[in-house]
Amino acid sequence: MAGNIFRCFLRSPRNFFQNRLLENTMYINGVSRLLSTTIDAKEIEHFSSFKNDWWDENGPLADLHLFALIRIKFVRDGLANAGIQIQDPALPLKGIRIVDVGCGGGILTERLARIGAQITGIDESAELINIAKEHAKLDPSVSERVNYIHTSVEDFSQKETESYDAVVTSEVLEHVVEPQLFLKECVKMLKPGGSIFVTTQNKTLATWFFLIVMGEYILRRIPFGTHEWNKFIAPHEVQSILDNYGCKTRLIHGMKLNPLLKQWSWSSCTAIFYALHAIKQKETNV
């Protein structure tokens, strides 16, 4: 085990980026061409392998279920602070059009639908989209507000330019190949004045040690192979990318999990987990 851990840490960044380049290169008439895509087939295969455990709140994705509560609060409060008028306290997101990018099996998507959002969940895994569709059928109040589509963010954004009040991409950015392109496509779908909500992990030694070494290798609290440290991204980088595409960051929260209480809470520390909310301005570069 120790050998695997140190190989993970010492892996050459140069080799990593070379491998990513090869994975996203195709050959046309013998000439290599770089694909403009955010898709990572290995990541899709990895998460699709949990399709039968996705809705097991005591299974391998238990922490993701716990995380849903603070993510809902993040989106709900962020939209309220952005000027969304709440007409029905029981359904605070009633009438709000949201797209959940990288929705997986629908853990967050369903919960947002339950508080009124008219929400579209998109994902590149056909297996997880099928799981999400089947689970939504169990609750009529969810199924009437949710639409799941098997598609990529690149394809979907071309059809749904400036169509949504909010874009949510939670625990997805650290799994894509090109985060800048991914965020650009997310911004395309936002109406001017719309909000983008991002939760992801910082690129620090703390994330390497606590998430990968402790979380995956030692405690096995996180499914092995879920994270690659080289794909984590710092909050100031996300803020800079969004700023270039005409989105002004409103806040950046740190987040932490108390494993004993099984509860997530806000934190002033963004060294590991963080949440970012930005608002699309009227004039953008997208």
Image: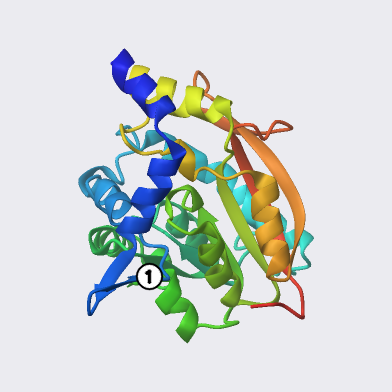
Q: Position of residue 247 (x, y in %)?
A: 72, 67
Q: How many marks?
A: 1
Say which residue appears at 30% left-offset and 31% top-offset.
Answer: 224
Question: Could you say which is closer to the camera, residue 261 or residue 165?
Answer: 165
Circle 1 sits on which residue?
35
Q: Residue furthest front?
A: 30
Can the viewer see residue 100? yes
Q: Which of the 4 image quarters holds residue 234?
A: top right
Q: Position of residue 38 (x, y in %)?
A: 42, 63
Position of the N terminus, as image quadrant, is top left
Position of the C terminus, as image quadrant, is bottom right
User: Please, what is the three-letter code of the amino acid marked with disc 1?
Assistant: Leu
Vertical position of residue 253 compared to residue 257: above or below: below
Q: Position of residue 149 (x, y in %)?
A: 35, 72
Q: Position of residue 61 (x, y in %)?
A: 35, 38
Question: Could you say which is closer to the camera, residue 170 or residue 112?
Answer: 170
Say which residue appears at 43% left-offset and 20% top-offset.
Answer: 214
Q: Secondary structure at mark 1?
A: loop
Q: Is residue 102 left or right of residue 26?
A: right
Vertical position of residue 158 compared to residue 7: above or below: below
Vertical position of residue 59 compared to residue 119: above or below: above
Q: Which of the 4 image quarters holds residue 271?
A: top right
Vertical position of residue 2 compared to residue 155: above or below: above
Say which residue appears at 32% left-offset and 33% top-offset.
Answer: 223
